[in-house]
Image (cartoon, rainbow, N blue to C red):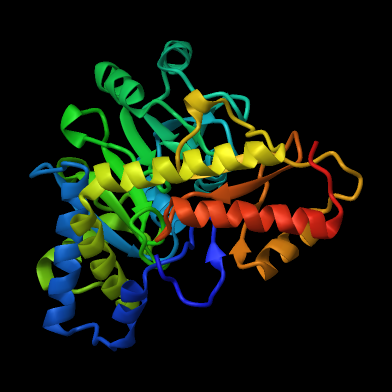
Amino acid sequence: MILGNDPILLTPGPLSTSPETRQAMLRDWGSWDAAFNQMTQTVCTDLVEIVHGENDYVCVPMQGSGTFAVEAAIGTLVPRNGCVLVPNNGAYCTRIIKILQRMGIAYVELALREDEPVSAAAIEDAFNGDTRITHVAQVHLETSAGLLNPLDDIAALCQRHGKSLIVDAMSSFGALPIDLRKGGIDALVSASGKCLEGVPGMGFVIVRRSVLLASEGQSPSLALDLHDQYTYMQKTTQWRFTPPTHVVAALRNALDRFIAEGGQPARGARYQQNCKTLVDAMKTLGFEPFLPAEVQAPVIVTFHAPKDPAWRFADFYAAVRDAGYVLYPGKLTQVETFRVGCIGAIDANELHNAVAAIDRSLKKLGVRVR
């Protein structure tokens, strides 16, 4: 895949986009323009179709990063007297807890290790131990490590117990199979700049229509009120406030490319091959993944840092960037790591080249891995 002369972003978003997607941003759009509003509608329709939302779910776009949309979903859909269970095995789970704290919403934290996926049994124990729980806020793919949580099992459990499930699918939407027809999920949150391979700037919430319509007046925020955003768009076809026009245009192009590639199965297969190529090649250099293979999602891989006293991530990052690739620092709290993404408009050949660049950078810095 030809990406031009810019460094390749091996990160979980922003990520490297196709030249065609970037080209889509060269036109200016008016926020009241009928063609732009029609584009927004087609984007929302396609997003719902990706996860088989059919007639029961609607897509509400939201200006801002994915966290804006997560906060909008929690603030709009959880009543002030609700209580949210948060299984916590990483930084993005912790961020949900911070949102709940700021909003003054009661929550129960289910603390887990950073390499430990939550189990349906542990969630059920939490339900049995605290009758206040009305909602579950679950991160599907915890990108601080690349850990995959068992969404289908959790959704089925929430459905049996009558709990409302809000899913942060930021780094899984479009890459991993999610089927809302199975039931149990009330809201699914993601963003434009992740596995759909658009540019950052627009979050979205795919939410059960009946749940959304029942949430009128619950949001403590004007800008992040999903109900108000949805009803205004239904009435006028327009966004309430200035929309991210260029981001929407880029996402429209990215979705066209997503569909042409073969949708989620094809996108997921490419990322899976990218991930396998990355892990196998890094192992030849002596790097070991932080997570066991059975819970590793094919989106971003966390590697243990070398124990060589010469190792400094900042130096390593700069050397690899000079070689054409941008990595991510570790986000774990217990051990020193760094992260390499597998997503974006890249293929397995690009991952081979990236590992070769990592090898050259380590030799240049005099860092031994083994």
Front residue (pair 217, 279): 279
Is residue 355 depicted above or below 83 in this figure? below
Q: Quadrant of the C terminus?
A: top right
Using the rendered view, name the quadrant where residue 152 is placed.
top left
Relative to 275, 185 lies left or right: left
Is residue 244 visible from the viewing direction of this image?
A: no
Q: Residue drawn at (24%, 72%), measured in percent from left and top?
A: 239
Total marks shown come to 0
Front residue (pair 284, 273): 284
Q: Residue drawn at (77%, 53%), measured in percent from left and top?
A: 362
Is residue 174 depicted above or below 65 in this figure? above
The furthest residue to the left: 55
Front residue (pair 90, 262): 262
Q: Residue 187's spot in the image, x, y percent?
A: 29, 42
Q: Quadrant of the N terminus?
A: bottom left
Relative to 82, 208 lies left or right: left
Q: Residue 90's spot in the image, x, y percent?
A: 58, 37
Q: Residue drawn at (25%, 69%), measured in percent from left and top?
A: 253
Q: Residue 361's spot in the image, x, y percent?
A: 74, 58
Using the rendered view, name the quadrant where residue 89 is placed.
top right
Q: Residue 251's spot in the image, x, y percent?
A: 29, 67
Q: Residue drawn at (43%, 10%), measured in percent from left and top?
A: 128
Using the rendered view, name the quadrant where residue 61 is placed.
bottom left
Is residue 256 visible from the viewing direction of this image?
A: yes
